[in-house]
C-alpha cells in the first residue's frame, strides 16, 4: 500500500471517520432528491460536492506519505464538513428538503465533524515516529 499505514489501519476503508463520511454522502444524495428541480445545479449540487469532498479528502490523505500531509487532508475534510453544515442550515432556512432528512444529515455531520481532531492528534504523534 502506498501511503501511511499503522498496525491498526491498512487503508482509508479501515477508518471509522471515512465510513461515517461515506454514509453521510450517501444520505446527502438521498435527501437532496426531494429538493426542487431548480436547485439541481444550486444548493443540491453544492451539498453533494461538500459531502463527497469529506470522504474523498480522508481517503486521499490516508494514501499520502507523511503524517503532516495526512493531517492537512483531514483539515480540508473538516472544512468541507463545516461547509455542509452551513448548506444544511441554508436549506432549512429557505424551507427546502424534508425536516427529518435535514436533521438526520446534521446529526451525522456533527459526528463526522468531531472525528478528525482525534485522528489528527493520533496521526501526528504515531506515524512519523
Image: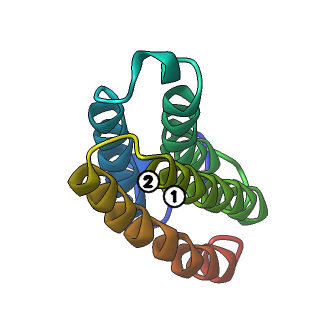
Q: Residue at x 49, y 43 (%)?
A: 51
Image coordinates of residue 69 in percent, x first then y, are: 76, 56
Q: Callout 1: few (<14), some (14-19), or many (20+) C-alpha neighbours within 10 Å? A: some
> Which residue is disc 2 drawn over?
92
Q: Position of residue 46 (x, y in %)?
A: 58, 33
Residue 98 shows up from this direction: yes
Q: Is residue 109 above or below residue 122?
A: above
42 to the left or right of 75: left
Q: Nearer the viewer, residue 1 or 83?
A: 83
Residue 89 is tagged as 1
Q: Does residue 128 lie above or below 12 as drawn?
A: below
User: Residue 28, position in %: x, y?
Assistant: 36, 40
- Image quarter (top left, top right, bottom left or bottom right) of the C terminus: bottom right
Q: CA distance from mark 1 to mark 2?
A: 5 Å
Give the percent coordinates (x, y) of residue 111: 38, 71
Q: How many C-alpha atoms fall within 10 Å of the one at disc 2: few (<14), some, or many (≥20)?
A: some
Residue at 47%, 73% in the rendered image: 115
Above or below for 112 versus 96: below
Q: Nearer the viewer, residue 62 or 4?
A: 62
Q: Which secondary structure lies at badge 2?
A: helix
Q: Secondary structure at mark 1?
A: helix
- Give the colour scheme shown: rainbow
Amino acid at each position: 500500500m502506498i501511503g501511511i499505514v499503522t498496525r491498526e489501519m491498512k487503508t482509508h476503508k479501515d477508518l471509522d471517520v471515512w465510513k461515517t463520511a461515506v454514509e453521510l454522502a450517501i444520505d446527502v444524495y438521498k435527501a437532496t432528491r426531494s429538493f426542487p428541480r431548480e436547485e439541481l445545479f444550486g444548493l443540491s449540487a453544492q451539498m453533494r460536492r461538500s459531502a463527497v469532498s469529506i470522504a474523498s479528502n480522508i481517503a486521499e490523505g490516508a494514501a499520502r506519505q507523511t503524517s503532516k500531509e495526512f493531517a492537512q487532508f483531514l483539515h480540508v475534510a473538516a472544512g468541507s464538513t463545516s461547509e455542509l453544515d452551513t448548506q444544511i442550515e441554508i436549506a432549512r432556512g429557505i424551507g427546502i428538503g424534508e425536516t427529518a432528512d435535514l436533521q438526520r444529515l446534521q446529526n451525522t455531520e456533527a459526528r463526522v465533524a468531531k472525528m478528525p481532531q482525534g485522528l489528527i492528534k493520533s496521526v501526528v504523534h504515531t506515524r512519523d515516529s
